[in-house]
Image: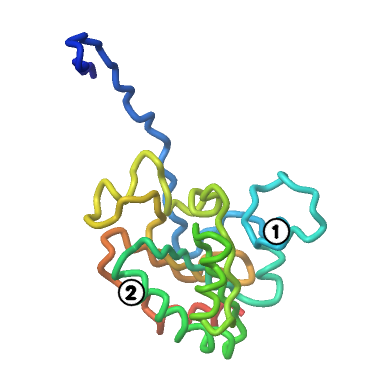
Amino acid sequence: MYYEIEDELGNVSTLQLKQREAEEQIEPPRESELAPLFYLRNEEGFPVTSLAGTSSDSELRSILDLVRFKPLVLSFYCNCWGSYAPKHLEAMKSLAPQVEALGGQLLILTNESQKEIGRIARKLDGEVQIYHDKNYNVARSYGVFSETSPIWDRIAGISEEVFTPSLFVVRRDRRVGYAFVDVDFDNTPDIEAVLKAIYDGR
């Protein structure tokens, strides 16, 4: 597509806009499918996600390490969801002790800064692991972030690159026991189904 732009001196120049390159949209994993592999690590004390094989850090932990002994509840979260964000965070706060009681673990991935992660942790009473999803590594692999199909293109009030609200229960065999992806920002995870998936996935 071409646009003609005239400056203050009357000079006309032509600008060609490049179309966004369509990336292959990854579908979120469904129940009973293998959860995509990802790694967790610390960079100077800041917990971040990592792509497979990009670090020789001895503290690198994969999803396989995480689910070896306990099912994992994996939630994506962003403050920039507006009024949806505090509701989701409150749901995670009430879910955390129930997950723990059933022998599971809760991990929240966010695109927030280190300072903001500290604030989120305080709101959750420090009971939940929170990692910065560096470069949206995990969100892309779980099909809940795409630069060529951004949320701000569809949902009013969101102007940033964000993930789709989502939550997955990953059983000890690395299979997904429950999947929730809220593309329209109008729903909440089924807590009873989440807890059942944790119980069944032990």
Checking the image for residue 188, the label placed there is 2
Q: Quadrant of the N terminus?
A: top left
Q: Which amino acid does label 1 sit on?
A: Arg
Q: Which quarter shows the C terminus?
A: bottom right
Residue bearing the label numbered 1: 41
Mark 2 falls on what kind of element? loop
Mark 1 Cα shell of 10 Å, populated few (<14), some (14-19), many (≥20):
many
Rendered image: mark on residue 14 = none
Q: Which of 192 and 114 is in front in this view?
A: 114
Residue at x 66%, y 61% (from the top left corner) = 46
Which residue is nearer to you in this view: 145 or 131?
131
Give left or right: position of 64 versus 165: right
* Residue 5 appears in view: no
Percent x, y of residue 24: 42, 37
Q: Residue furthest bottom?
A: 101
- Which amino acid, by three-letter code, is at mark 2? Thr
Residue 165 x %, y %: 38, 63
Picture quadrant of residue 79: bottom left
Above or below for 102 versus 167: below
Hey, which quadrant is residue 198 in on the image?
A: bottom right
Which label lies toward us, 2 or 1?
1
Name which of mark 2 and mark 1 comes first in the sequence.
1
